[in-house]
C-alpha cells in the first residue's frame, strides 16, 4: 500500500490528514489540538463554539434579548468568545505540532464579525480558516488581513472559478488549499445544486481532476486539494496518492473523529454510531438554510418527512378545481382546496393532526397541537443563527426578515444542534452524519466497543485501516 507523505499546509510540513470541522461543539479545541499533535491538521468549529465558566464547565448559551436583533448580537458575542476559547485549547493541546484550523459557515449568522473577532482575539493560534455553505467571497480579504491561510469548501470546479474570478485572485498567496467536499457523501450541509441529481452520485475523481485542471490554469498547480466526504481509510484512495494528474492532495476525515476518546459528543451519540446500517442516513432538504444535508434517520428526521407528506395546496378564493371550502385555524377561516385534498385533510385531522400551518408555497401542513406549539415557540425564539432562515423568516438585513412567510416544514437548527451536542436525546434531535457512518459497525478497529484516542486513529489511518 502506498503511504502518504508530508506536504506543506498553512506554512508547515504536516501529514496530509485533516480533521473535518463539524459544527456546534462537535469539533472543538481538544479534538483539533489532539489531531494537530498527531502531526496532521486539526479543525475546530467556529460555529457557536462552546465557552467555559471558571470551573471549566460549559457556559450555557442563554439569550436575554427581547428582539431577534438583540439576540443576534448576543449570538455574535457568544460565537467570538467560544471561538477564542477553542483556539486557545487547541494551541495548548497541540504543543506546537501540526496545524490548527477553524471552520466557519459563510451562511451562519454574523460570520464576518465572528471571524474578525476570533482571529483578532486568538492571533497566532489559528493557522487556517476553512469556509463553506455559500459563496465565501470575502473570506480571502478577512484572512489575508490577519495573515491566516484560507481554504474555501466547494463541490465543483465551477464554484471555485466564480470565487477565484471575483475575489481569490487578489490573495493567491494566502490561499492554502481548496477543499472539495463530495456533495453526495459528506455529512452535514452539502453543495448539491439544481443541475445535479441527489439520487445519482458521481465519482469524485473526475470532478476533482476538473478542479485541478482549473487550478493549473490560474497558477495553483501545487496548491493542495483536500478530498472531503466519504473518506474512511487511505487504502481506498490509492490512485489519488502521488497522482501526477491530481497533484498535492490531502484527505479530510469528518465522520471517524466522532468516535474518539477526545470527541465531546455525548456517550449516547457514540453508542448510536456503531449500530447504524447502510441506508440509515438521509440526504434531504429540510434544513432552514435551503441546502441539502445528510443526517441519521431517527424520529426527528421521520417527523420532518411525514410532516411534509401531510401537505396540500390551497387558495384564498375558489378557483376551478380548487373550490372545496376547508375551515382552518381556531376561527375556522375558509380556504379552498380540491375535493380529494379535503378528504385527505379530514383523515389527518381525525388522526389528531388538527393544526393546519401555512407555508411560503401556499400549502397547508397538518401537525398536532403539541408540534405546532414547538414550531411556533422556536420561530419566536429565533436569534438569527443563519444569514437567512427559511424556518423563522429571519434575514441578516436592516429589516431583519426575508419578507416571506416562515416555513413550518423546516426546523430551528440552532436549538436542535445545541441539544444533541450537550444532551442525551439522539432520537429526537438532528444527528448530522456522512454516508459512510455505518462503517463503524463493521470496521474491526472498533470491535468489542473499542474507542480510540485521536492519536490511535491517526496511526490507524496511516497504516491504511
Image (spheres, rainbow, N blue to C red):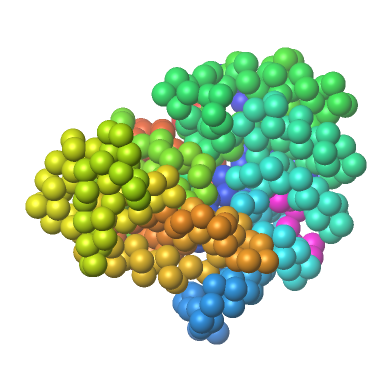
Question: At 24% across and 38% down in the image, what residue appears?
Answer: 338
Question: At 72% across and 15% down in the image, what residue appears?
Answer: 245
120, above or below 395, in the image: below
Give how far across and how far down residue 246 sits, in percent.
Answer: 71, 20
**In the figure, is residue 270 to the left or right of 118?**
left
Observer-nearest residue: 406 or 459? 406
Residue 90 in view of the camera: no
Give how far across and how far down residue 92 sits, in percent.
Answer: 66, 65
Question: At 72% across and 60% down in the image, what residue appears?
Answer: 112
* Residue stretch rendered in magenta on the structure: 122-130
Give how far across and how far down residue 425 sits, in percent.
Answer: 29, 60
**Image quadrant where residue 206 sits:** top right
Dominant secondary-structure state across the stretch colored magenta: loop
Question: At 78% across and 50% down in the image, what residue appears?
Answer: 138
**Residue 230 part of the magenta segment:** no
**In the figure, is residue 412 to the left or right of 211?**
left
Q: Which image quadrant: the N terminus?
A: top right
Residue 220 in view of the camera: yes
**In the figure, is residue 374 to the left or right of 452?**
left
**Image quadrant where residue 400 sits:** bottom right
Observer-nearest residue: 376 or 456? 376
**Residue 126 part of the magenta segment:** yes
Amino acid at each position: 500500500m502506498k503511504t502518504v507523505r508530508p506536504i506543506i499546509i498553512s506554512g508547515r510540513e504536516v501529514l496530509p490528514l485533516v480533521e473535518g470541522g463539524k459544527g456546534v461543539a462537535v469539533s472543538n479545541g481538544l479534538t483539533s489540538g489532539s489531531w494537530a499533535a498527531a502531526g496532521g491538521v486539526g479543525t475546530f468549529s467556529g460555529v457557536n463554539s462552546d465557552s467555559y465558566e471558571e470551573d471549566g464547565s460549559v457556559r450555557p448559551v442563554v439569550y436575554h434579548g427581547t428582539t431577534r436583533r438583540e439576540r443576534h448580537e448576543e449570538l455574535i458575542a457568544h460565537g467570538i468568545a467560544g471561538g477564542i476559547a477553542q483556539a486557545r485549547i487547541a494551541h495548548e493541546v497541540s504543543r506546537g505540532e501540526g496545524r490548527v484550523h477553524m471552520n466557519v459557515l459563510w451562511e451562519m449568522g454574523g460570520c464576518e464579525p465572528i471571524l474578525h473577532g476570533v482571529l483578532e482575539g486568538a492571533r497566532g493560534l489559528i493557522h487556517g480558516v476553512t469556509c463553506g455553505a455559500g459563496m465565501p467571497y470575502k473570506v480571502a480579504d478577512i484572512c489575508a488581513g490577519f495573515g491566516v491561510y484560507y481554504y474555501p469548501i466547494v463541490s465543483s470546479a465551477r464554484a471555485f472559478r466564480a470565487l477565484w474570478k471575483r475575489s481569490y485572485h487578489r490573495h493567491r498567496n494566502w490561499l492554502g488549499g481548496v477543499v472539495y467536499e463530495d456533495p453526495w457523501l459528506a455529512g452535514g450541509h452539502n453543495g448539491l445544486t439544481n443541475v445535479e441529481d441527489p439520487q445519482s452520485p458521481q465519482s469524485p475523481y473526475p470532478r476533482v481532476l476538473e478542479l485541478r485542471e482549473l487550478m493549473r490554469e490560474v497558477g495553483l498547480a501545487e496548491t493542495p486539494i483536500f478530498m472531503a466526504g466519504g473518506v474512511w481509510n487511505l487504502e481506498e484512495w490509492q490512485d489519488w496518492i502521488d497522482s501526477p494528474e491530481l497533484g498535492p492532495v490531502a484527505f479530510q476525515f469528518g465522520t471517524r473523529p466522532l468516535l474518539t476518546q477526545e470527541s465531546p459528543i455525548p456517550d449516547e451519540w457514540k453508542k448510536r454510531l456503531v449500530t447504524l446500517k447502510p441506508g440509515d442516513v438521509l440526504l434531504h432538504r429540510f434544513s432552514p438554510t435551503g441546502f441539502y444535508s445528510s443526517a441519521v434517520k431517527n424520529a426527528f428526521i421521520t417527523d420532518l418527512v411525514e410532516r411534509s407528506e401531510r401537505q396540500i395546496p390551497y387558495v384564498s378564493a375558489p378557483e376551478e378545481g380548487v373550490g372545496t371550502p376547508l375551515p382552518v385555524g381556531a376561527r375556522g377561516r375558509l380556504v379552498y382546496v380540491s375535493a380529494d385534498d379535503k378528504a385527505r385533510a379530514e383523515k389527518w385531522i381525525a388522526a389528531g393532526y388538527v393544526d393546519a400551518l401555512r407555508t411560503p408555497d401556499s400549502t397547508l401542513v397538518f401537525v398536532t397541537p403539541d408540534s405546532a406549539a414547538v414550531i411556533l415557540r422556536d420561530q419566536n425564539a429565533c436569534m438569527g443563527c443563519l444569514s437567512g432562515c427559511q424556518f423563522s423568516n429571519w434575514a441578516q438585513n436592516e429589516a431583519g426578515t426575508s419578507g416571506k412567510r416562515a416555513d413550518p416544514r423546516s426546523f430551528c437548527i440552532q436549538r436542535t444542534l445545541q441539544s444533541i451536542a450537550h444532551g442525551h436525546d439522539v432520537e429526537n434531535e438532528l444527528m448530522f452524519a456522512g454516508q459512510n457512518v455505518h462503517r463503524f459497525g463493521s470496521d474491526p478497529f472498533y470491535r468489542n466497543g473499542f474507542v480510540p484516542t485521536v492519536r490511535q486513529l491517526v496511526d490507524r489511518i496511516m497504516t491504511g485501516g
